[in-house]
Image (tube, grey):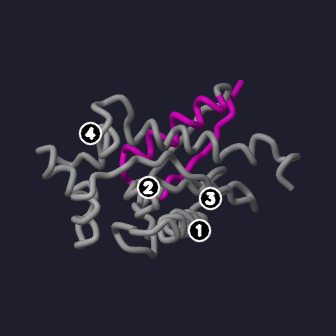
Amino acid sequence: MQQNIIKVIVGSKNPVKINAAANAMALLFPEYEIQTQGMDAPSGVPAQPMTDSDTRQGAINRVHYCQQQVEADYYFAMEGGVDCFEFGPATFAYIAIAHQARLSVGRGALLPLPMQVYQALEAGEELGHVMDRLFNTVNIKQKGGAICLLTHGHATRESNYTQAIILAMAPFLNPELYP
């Protein structure tokens, strides 16, 4: 008897994003074998999105690109960005998921950012590089991310993405409620 397989394409080769997609799908579909593969997908927005809108659009653009390139059951894209809100600067990620003709968009938790970090981003730097310099780390964006550093390891970039993916999957898990 052959086990059912769900093929997932992630619009990034970042292992944090690929692992988050694989973990979320394994939790949601434990009876399936989840095959997850990353691919480079252009966001069409700046490398460090500085607005909520650009961040959301980057995730959607990556999903659409993946859909045009390869056949899969699900397409996932995660785009991290920052914005300055009334309560101060924060970083967050948008999640875009496509399955058949449906697109679902969700957002991960907001992580407040120190003003000095936000100012470096406004000056053109990327969050991972700023955090590496501030905390003396190397390539933190492919590990725990700013989330891990600023929460003293109690949360990670991957845990935030995994949670956001599970929430964004609601329309696919309950299609009768989301016409």
Q: Distance between the residues labelled 2 and 1?
A: 33 Å
Looking at numbered disc 3 in the image, what kind of residue is underneath it? Glu
**Residue at numbered disc 4:** 149
The mark that comes first in sequence, 2 or 3, is 3
How far apart marks 2 and 3 lie (CA) works out to 42 Å
List x then y, in percent, for residue 162: 51, 39
Which corner quadrant holds the C terminus? bottom right
As measured in the structure, the alpha-carbon distance from the residue carrying label 3 to the one carrying label 1 is: 12 Å
Element class at badge 2:
loop
State which mark lies toward you, 2 or 3.
2
Q: Which mark is residue 125?
A: none
> x%, y% of residue 137?
15, 44
In this rendering, would 163 be left or right of 50?
right
Tell me whether circle 4 and circle 3 mark residues in contact (CB < 8 Å): no
Instruction: Work out whether mark 4 precedes mark 2 in sequence or the reverse, and give the earlier one.
Output: 2
Which structural element holds mark 1? helix
Query: What distance separates the C-alpha of mark 1 from that of mark 4?
Result: 32 Å
Mark 4 vs mark 3: which is more N-terminal? 3
Q: What residue type is labelled 4?
A: Leu
Front: mark 4 or 2: 2
Q: Answer few, some or many: residues within 10 Å of disc 2's Cα (few below 14, many 20 plus, some between 14 and 19).
A: few
Which is in the foreground here, disc 3 or disc 1?
1
User: Badge 2 is on which residue?
Assistant: 87
Which mark, by number, is residue 64? 1
Horizontal placement of 76 versus 158: left or right?
Answer: right
In the image, is residue 33 above or below residue 75?
A: above
